[in-house]
């Protein structure tokens, strides 16, 4: 069934939908049913060139506008996105499999928040005056040029907006390549931006797999690359961007720790663990999938967790009573199944879940493993699925050392009633985004990004401006110039 909000072509270039069936066909599979709901075609070299040319031609005039004018466009787009939230959420649910209960509050709304926030900030992007005696220096904040955004499949609408909003606010143009697994939603973002008055060429969407992304990254006319994806993909793209001395933002994966101390509120801690492991069926980069629970409360925690997981409703994702959806693809289900099997083989104790459902689509029940040790695969590899590893600990110093013993550093959480300990622990965590008595909150006002292998740069907040603009310093001499000859 074709929904009225479904995009009408594969690409969006220079303010219009564009189709070219010469590109490799990419079937769009609904994760809940396994049915093909659309087919898009990968961008051909001709379309890639057309999009880059359109972006470069439009960017200069856009950058020359006053920031408040750029901001008005973004704010109008935010209003349109909120007005159409239900239709956009239905499309996101069809594209990703996430329950409508979730997409209604976490996807297009989050994208609208980003457009509104950076639209409001656009007029405040100023330089600085530095007095040096009679002389002085002023700085100009200038755009980078043409930015490339490469999205992940878990939050296609949100990620498109998280990248487009600061890029456009700063006066850049953007070419966005969605994941080939969830290609539809970014096209609606482009459609809405165009309707809001964004000049043609400033936000273009091209479909394709890694070869299209590589062609865009390697093109010398691309000035900046922003990726949301896995660490292995990030390593490749970072290296390719470095060859061209391009600006980069890398928002990569993690194996984040969530620490539950013996004085924690059990209900809140269980709730945080559910949000940090099973929201979006566990397909969230910042998830706290290593749940360290103090040995004295471990069984109490596990008992309550198993009870609350009985409330998971695995039904039609378009039914708002459903609160747990399928995995995004057959391949992702295969990966998660493999981790469940390996966890059992390595000696972890399955508390609940991990059952593949005999129904169309890519369904597995939320799994909890206890008695997990640091050396088990389940405690080391990013799974990107609904699999929680519960580990025991005894002391604060011990758990901090173990929590940091990973190449990743995206997020971390701590549950405790001792606020002094909470701040002490997060100060020692090697993670870019930390939570105290909460997990996975991502307001646009707060910087988001990782340390170590989990990323470079920050998305959201005023910090994102630094990654989509550059400073020019201008020295002004008021007196005569003295020279040695």
Image (cartoon, rainbow, N blue to C red):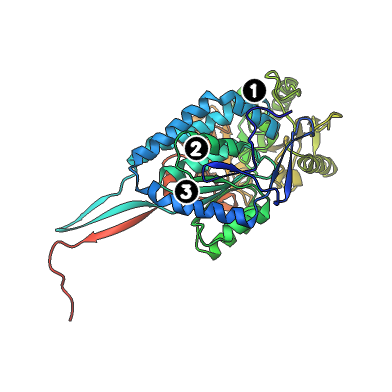
19 lies above or below 85:
below
- How far apart marks 1 and 3 lie (CA) works out to 33 Å
Q: Kindly tell me whether residue 235 is visible in this rendering.
A: no
- How far apart marks 2 and 1 lie (CA) works out to 28 Å
Q: Give SS at disc 1.
A: helix
Residue 12: give x, y in percent of width and height. 58, 43
Q: Kindly tell me whether residue 216 is visible in this rendering.
A: yes
Residue 209: give x, y in percent of width and height. 68, 51
- Residue 194's label in the rendered image is 2
N-terminal-most mark, 2 or 1: 1
N-terminal-most mark, 3 or 2: 3
Which residue is most to the right? 358
Residue 436: give x, y in percent of width and height. 53, 32
To which quarter of the image does residue 371 belong?
top right
Q: Which residue is at the front of the view, 181 or 278?
A: 181
- How far apart marks 3 and 2 lie (CA) works out to 13 Å
Q: Is residue 247 left or right of residue 70?
A: right
Q: Give SS at disc 2.
A: helix
Packing grade of label 3 (10 A; few <14, some 14-19, many >=20) is many
Which residue is most to the bottom? 485
Q: Quadrant of the C terminus?
A: bottom left
Q: Which residue is at the front of the view, 309 or 247?
A: 247
Judging by the rendered image, the residue that carries numbered circle 1 is 101
Residue 24: give x, y in percent of width and height. 72, 50
N-terminal-most mark, 1 or 3: 1
Judging by the rendered image, the residue that carries numbered circle 3 is 173
């Amino acid at each position: 069934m074709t929904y009225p909000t479904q995009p009408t072509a594969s690409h969006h270039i220079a303010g219009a939908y564009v189709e070219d069936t010469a590109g490799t066909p990419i079937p769009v599979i609904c994760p809940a049913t396994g049915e093909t709901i659309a087919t898009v075609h990968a961008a051909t070299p001709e379309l890639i060139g057309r999009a880059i040319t359109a972006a470069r031609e439009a960017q200069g005039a856009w950058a020359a506008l006053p920031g408040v004018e750029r901001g008005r466009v973004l704010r109008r787009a935010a209003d349109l996105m909120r007005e159409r939230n239900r239709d956009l959420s239905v499309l996101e649910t069809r594209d990703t499999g996430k329950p409508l209960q979730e997409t209604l509050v976490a996807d297009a709304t989050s994208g609208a928040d980003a457009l509104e926030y950076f639209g409001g900030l656009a007029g405040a992007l100023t330089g600085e005056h530095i007095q040096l005696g009679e002389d002085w220096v002023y700085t100009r904040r200038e755009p980078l040029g043409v930015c490339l955004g490469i999205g992940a499949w878990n939050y296609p609408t949100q990620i498109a907006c998280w990248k487009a909003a600061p890029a456009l606010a700063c006066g850049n143009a953007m070419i966005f390549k969605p994941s080939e697994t969830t290609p539809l939603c970014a096209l609606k973002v482009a459609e809405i931006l165009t309707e809001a008055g964004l000049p043609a060429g400033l936000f273009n969407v091209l479909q394709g797999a890694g070869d299209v992304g590589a062609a865009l990254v390697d093109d010398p006319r691309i000035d900046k690359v922003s990726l949301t994806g896995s660490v292995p993909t990030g390593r490749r793209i970072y290296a390719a961007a470095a060859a061209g001395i391009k600006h980069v933002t890398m928002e990569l994966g993690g194996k984040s720790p969530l620490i539950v101390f013996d004085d924690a509120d059990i209900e809140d801690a269980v709730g945080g663990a559910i949000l940090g492991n099973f929201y979006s069926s566990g397909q969230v980069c910042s998830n706290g999938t290593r749940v360290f629970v103090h040995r004295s409360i471990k069984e109490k925690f596990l008992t309550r967790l198993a009870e609350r997981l009985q409330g998971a409703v695995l039904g039609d994702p378009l039914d708002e009573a459903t609160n747990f959806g399928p995995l995004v693809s057959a391949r992702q289900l295969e990966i998660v199944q493999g981790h469940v099997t390996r966890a059992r083989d390595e000696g972890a104790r399955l508390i609940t879940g991990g059952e593949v459902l005999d129904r169309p689509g890519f369904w597995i029940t939320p799994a909890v493993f206890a008695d997990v040790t640091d050396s088990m695969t389940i405690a080391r590899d990013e799974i990107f699925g609904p699999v929680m590893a519960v580990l025991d600990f005894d002391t604060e110093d011990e758990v901090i050392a173990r929590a940091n013993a990973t190449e990743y550093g995206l997020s971390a959480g701590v549950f405790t009633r001792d606020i002094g300990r909470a701040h002490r622990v997060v100060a020692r965590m090697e993670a870019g985004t930390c939570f105290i008595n909460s997990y996975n909150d991502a307001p646009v006002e707060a910087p988001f990004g990782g340390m170590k292998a989990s990323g470079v740069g920050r998305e959201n907040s005023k910090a994102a401006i630094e990654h989509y603009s550059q400073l020019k310093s201008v020295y002004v001499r008021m007196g005569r110039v003295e020279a040695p000859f």
